[in-house]
Amino acid sequence: MYFERLKLALPAVRERIDRACRRVGRAGAEAVVIVAVTKGHSLEALRAAAEVGLETIGENRVQEARQKYEAAGDLGLRWHLVGHLQRNKVRQALKIFELIHSVDSLRLGLAIDREAAKLGRRAAVLVQVNASGEGAKYGLPVDEALSVASGLCEMDNLRVVGVMTMAPFVSDEEILRRTFRRTRRLYDECREHLVKFEARHLSMGMTNDFEIAVEEGSTMLRLGTVLFGER
Ligand SMILES: *Cc1c(COP(=O)(O)O)cnc(C)c1O
């Protein structure tokens, strides 16, 4: 079921990404990474994602991801954590995920740094910003984000490889666009001011807003519903 759906949905999504790129003169829609968000869907969704050639899946809860991860076997997928991470789940998270999109405090950064040191590796993270200023639960306020990013960059066992935002659930295009522009500006500021910042990923755009996000420079889309249907 997931496979049939994805076979139709993925080319359509790619086409929409492509058109958004062309509207703003961005070269190469292939430079936009799709993180297929499988939260709330069964293992079959992950298998289907692998079968249609998607390389990266996103989960938002460590517990759910862990169950799937252990049951999945090696599907050749990269796993990203897109949702909030509690400090007491960091160790488990590092065993599963190669990128954590949701670091929004120095305290969480320190916890990841410490566990990564124990595992003898550096953990790749994104700084999550609440760029809309609306009462979102997670993400740094824009005016604190640069200084927190700076602190994270100084941690030996972290690689800060970009910025992530979640836009508010509104249909007002101007609000969405403004949110993405602020996030893009923060990303550029990090690149400009922080020597250790690795400007690789600008993670913004979900099912409802991904074309606007692409127009505003997103390099990484986190797509659930448009690929797998309603959860
Ligand atoms: C669920 C989720 C997504 C995907 O949402 P859709 O609207 O289904 O595309 C993206 N990012 C995060 C952080 C999520 O929790």
Image: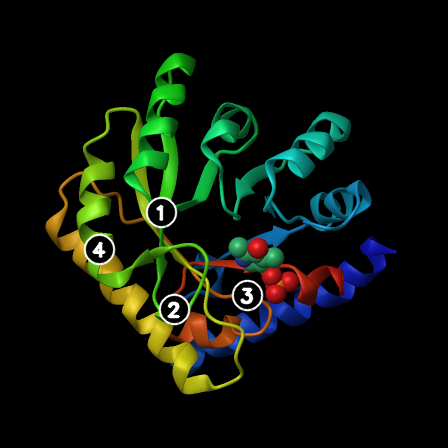
Q: Tell me if label 4 and label 3 are in contact, CB under 8 Å.
A: no
Label 4 vs 3, first from the N-terminus: 4
Q: Residues within 10 Å of mark 1 (few under 14, many from 20)?
A: many
Check disc 1 and report the residue beneath it. 104
User: Mark 3: which secondary structure?
Assistant: loop
The quadrant the N terminus occupies is: bottom right
* Rendering coords of residue 87 (x, y %): 45, 32
Q: Residues within 10 Å of mark 4 (few under 14, many from 20)?
A: few
Give the colour scheme of this rendering: rainbow
User: Mark 1: which secondary structure?
Assistant: loop
Check disc 2 and report the residue beneath it. 27
Left or right of residue 142: residue 213: right
Q: Residue at x 63, y 52 (%)?
A: 37
* Amino acid at the residue labelled 4: Glu
Left or right of residue 80: residue 128: left
Label 1 vs 4, first from the N-terminus: 1
Give residue 144's mark: 4
* Amino acid at the residue labelled 1: Asp
Mark 2 CB lies closer than 8 A to ligand 1: no
Label 2 vs 4, first from the N-terminus: 2
Residues 7 and 161: in front is 161
Q: Residues within 10 Å of mark 2 (few under 14, many from 20)?
A: few
Residue 188: name its quadrant.
bottom left
Q: Nearer the viewer, mark 3 or mark 1?
A: 1
* Rendering coords of residue 195 (x, y %): 13, 42
Q: Residues within 10 Å of mark 3 (few under 14, many from 20)?
A: many
* Amino acid at the residue labelled 3: Met
Q: Nearer the viewer, mark 1 or mark 2?
A: 1
The quadrant the C terminus occupies is: bottom right
* Rendering coords of residue 165 (x, y %): 41, 60
Q: Mark 3 to mark 1: distance in Å?
A: 19 Å
Residues 219 and 228: in front is 228
